[in-house]
Image (cartoon, rainbow, N blue to C red):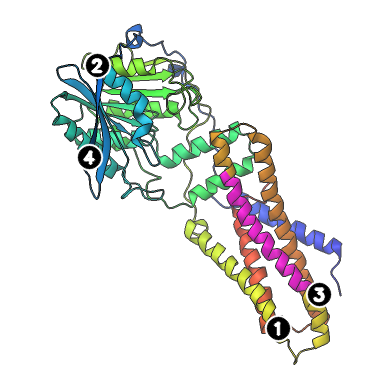
Amino acid sequence: MRTGRGTLSVAAGLVLVALASVGYVLPPAFDPPPLKVDPAFQAIPPQPPGELRPVVAVDPLRREEVSVAGEGQRLEGTLRAPVTPGRHPAMVFVSGSGNGSRTEFTPQAEFLAKAGVVTIAFDKRTVGYDFRERDFGLLADDALRMVEYLRTRPEVDPARIGLWGVSEGGWVVPIAAAKSASVGFAVLVSSPNVSPIRQVAWALNEQLLRLRAPIGARDLLTRAMGGVGFNFLRYDAMPALSQIKQPVLAFYGTTDPSIPFVESTKALISALDTAGNDDYTIRFMAKGDHAMRVNGGEFTKGYLETLTNWITGLPGTARPAVHLAGATPVQRFEASDVPAAPWYAGGTMLGLTICLAAVGYVAGPVAAMVVRLRGRPHVPVETNARLWPPIRRRLSRMAWTGLGLLLSVVAFIMLLVLFSVNQAGAWPAVLAGWLVVRLLAVLMLIQEVTAVAAFVSALREGMRPGRWQHVAVAGVLGGTGLLLVAAAYYGLFAFPW
């Protein structure tokens, strides 16, 4: 007796509703509220003219390759120094996340050296730093080794050696400054000052809003983030920031899509107040992006001048007339934390689910092939020969759909990363990618329901599955069932789309 299409439709609908409810019932949820408007950030004065005065950056300079011993490896860098006589202020560049090549700092280092500031830009270490493991304290020690090297140079004023850190470097520089009095000042560029996971979640939300991606795409990615067990994601920046006694210059771009600049500023002010440090200067640069450039091109107007005038003017520039100045920053949403995933949705369980599903998908076709080669002479041969092939074809299609869903999710995430860098033509592609992911999930659900119904109907018609046939059915149906539950947790069946 065959199961009717109406019955199958009702069954599929009920299962869909049940799976859709999983995304709402199970934590964690991520829904950042709008950031309340702070009047203090709506009445920011313009920068004092003295900070923006033109810089004479024409002095000849000398370049020198340096190598400093670090923990587990040598640190290779480039020193640039003016050839004018006397001792000069000096600064070490500390890179953001990624491979951290010294070449990314060349334009700033050249400008500063020509204006009278000795600089060192060095390649980030490769030992003890990777995508999963990041020890900010180890990176801070690397920066301090460069500071100590500069103290040995005759052209450097040892009382005016500072650190410059961008993005992830904003978590590194405060550790170094709090640890060593040899650091004379700190420059923070696009420093998050919140935990890495809050910063990434905020940036993700902002990018998806710019891409006009469906809300479900955000839920998928943030739930995945909640299950990631990277040790550095919940790093608390406040203890180190609260110990900085040196003068601080901080830059934030008003078009930066990567950090919550208003909350980062508030965190910095609060930490320096705890430290009793009133020597800080915070400047919001109009049209500035994460690297203080305008759309990735030229540096935002006034950035290099402000940086140079502040460093060369120390200690007189340490305490400004106004702490906050520049363009008006507008941050739309709070930098909300991403709750840690429960044990059943963590990275280990997700990996186990995928592995079990993969085993089932491999076992199914292998078992089906064994059935075809060996046959089952002690069961009703004609009945099995008639009823088994359609079931085998269903199982094969389910395995391919499950594999396609996994690949489509990975491709969709890569698509979002690609368009977060270049947003040209992103909106249709993002919607199309999300539609493919959701349709494959629904197709897999329908295949699961219809395959179960077909197998039950075959049993009613007299089919007597052998051991290998049971393995094939259990492997594919079980693997698909696991993927359906995982897809439900990550919101692939939730409404609205």
Disc 3 versus disc 4: nearer the observer: 4
Task: Kindly report the distance in space between the C-alpha atoms of the residues bearing marks 3 and 4.
Answer: 74 Å
Task: Kindly report the distance in space between the C-alpha atoms of the residues bearing marks 3 and 1.
Answer: 24 Å
Task: Please report the residue visible at 35 percent of the width from the left and 15 percent of the height from the top.
Answer: 305
Check disc 3 and give the amino acid type.
Ser
Residue 67, numbered circle: 4
Task: Please report the residue visible at 59 percent of the width from the left and 43 percent of the height from the top.
Answer: 415
Task: Quickly name the residue at label 3.
Answer: 457
**Would you call the spot at circle 3 few (<14 residues within 10 Å), some (14-19), or many (20 or more)?**
some
Q: Is residue 87 above or below residue 398?
A: above
Disc 2 versus disc 4: nearer the observer: 4
Residue 312, numbered circle: 2
Choose the circle earlier in sequence order: 1 or 4: 4
Secondary structure of residue under mark 3 = helix
Looking at the image, which is closer to me, 72 or 476?
A: 72
Q: Residue 80 vs residue 462: left or right?
A: left
- The answer to whether residue 323 is seen in the rendering is no
Task: Kindly report the distance in space between the C-alpha atoms of the residues bearing marks 2 and 1.
Answer: 83 Å
Check disc 2 and give the amino acid type.
Thr
Secondary structure of residue under mark 2 = helix
Choose the circle earlier in sequence order: 2 or 1: 2
Task: Quickly name the residue at label 1.
Answer: 373
Choose the circle earlier in sequence order: 3 or 4: 4
* Residue 34 x/y as whole percent: 54, 29
Choose the circle earlier in sequence order: 2 or 4: 4
* Residue 226 x/y as whole percent: 49, 49
Secondary structure of residue under mark 4 = strand
